[in-house]
Image: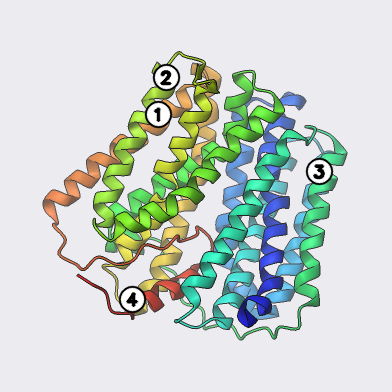
Amino acid sequence: MKTLLSISALLFTIMLMQMGTTALGPLDTLSAIELGFSNTEIGVIGGSHFLGFLIGCLGSPLLVKRVGHARAYCVTAALSIVAILLHPVVTYFWAWCIFRIITGIAIATSYTSVESWLNAKLTNSNRGRFFGIYRIIDMTGALVAQAMISVLVPAYFLSYTMLAILVCLSLLPLGLTKSVQPAMPETQKINVFFAFQISPLAALGVLTVGATGSALRMIGPLFAYELAFTPTQIGIFLSLPLIAGMIIQMPIAYLAERATPRQLIGSLSMATIFICVAFTLIEAETIFGIKTIFILVFIFGLTTMPLYSLSAIHANNQTKEQDMTMLSASLIFLFGVGAIISPVIASYLIEHFGPNSMFTYFAVLHVMLLGYTAYRARIRPLDIPLRPYIYIPRTSLFIAKTIKGLRRRPHKS
């Protein structure tokens, strides 16, 4: 209980940041539709967010090392507040791209600051447990943010002001905490293609997750708008994959004790293909009184949300402990590459081939992942002990410490 109280300020900080910045993506998409932006421009705006996120993931450790955790967070949070407030003031495509790059950098820096601070306060014996609490708080903030879309009016100054206020409030817990800031570890030179050298399958898995997750998050509102969804229905559509992701963690942890990450990646990828095909083939509007698309997108969340963690664990199982931080940074880079490009592709496909083409695109990505999984299983059989599954966030490289702590514990073969 004492440990939980000591990290409570960090938990509240990240939840408020999540609520303010996660809602910005779908709000921008709906606002851009209202302002007459083209679908391709909407995709580029979504990709700009992940470009900023990637820059922040790679550069924020240097900033935190230079000025400290709290100051690094405050500086980038202040910049993101300005960027959010400028959206309804400067309604130009190029300006919104710049604003989203800034907020992407802020999100990455906030995670780097909070997660490294959190890591320093925890030990190997309790790190996994309290990081689990941290991820629940984090995902709760993201879930509330998606639900807010049902009440935020697109292209309206008050809507953006509400998001800026949430980010402002996130400064209070961090500014008032009595917790002493930890010293930063020495930064390492990053080899962004290290994951390919260790596990090409894990690299492709993370690229696929980046491509599907970013497109659903940024272009999902456009998909729902094209299907004439109401704002409330759009909020439900965006929230369901996150709810599914929270639900699936325990079942996946159970299965991970009985199957290898590679087997689970292949199985989940195959299930994702069937779900994506169902989006284009099932014509019934409702099933048991529930919108068919809601059911399908919920199952889509069940099959795709664990893939990043499984890919990272698969690669970490084959990595020396001293190289795990390098691997984590490399995976983040690959995730960012997929996330930057995919919203542009998805928005282009929707504009020219209709909304269901987005899930056809997802199906193609997972066909490639499934085929490569089968190929790697044939040419490189694995004989390694099964390790516990943990939900690995797609944020800072400091999460590698959590995996290190788990790997030091004995495991049952």
Q: In the image, residue 10 lies at what x, y percent?
A: 67, 71
Would you call the spot at circle 3 few (<14 residues within 10 Å), some (14-19), or many (20 or more)?
many
Q: Amino acid at mark 3?
A: Tyr
Residue receiving disc 2: 280
Q: Earlier in the sequence, mark 4 or mark 3?
A: 3
Residue at horizontal 28 percent and vertical 79 percent from the top = 410
Query: Does dot 4 land on a helix, a strand or a loop?
Result: helix
Residue receiving disc 1: 276
Q: Nearer the viewer, residue 258 or 62?
A: 258
Query: Does dot 2 land on a helix, a strand or a loop?
Result: helix
Q: Residue furthest top?
A: 283
Would you call the spot at circle 4 few (<14 residues within 10 Å), some (14-19), or many (20 or more)?
some
Q: Quadrant of residue 117?
A: bottom right
Kindly indicate whether the residue at mark 2 contacts the one at mark 1 (C-beta within 8 angstroms).
yes
Q: Amino acid at mark 4?
A: Arg
Q: Earlier in the sequence, mark 4 or mark 1?
A: 1
Q: Identify the image quadrant of the C terminus.
A: bottom left
Q: In the image, residue 243 lies at what x, y percent?
A: 54, 45
How far is disc 1 from disc 3 in space, using C-alphas? Answer: 33 Å
How far is disc 1 from disc 2 in space, using C-alphas? Answer: 7 Å
Q: Earlier in the sequence, mark 2 or mark 4?
A: 2
Would you call the spot at circle 2 few (<14 residues within 10 Å), some (14-19), or many (20 or more)?
some
Q: Earlier in the sequence, mark 3 or mark 2?
A: 3
Q: In the image, residue 7 lies at what x, y percent?
A: 65, 75
Residue receiving disc 4: 407
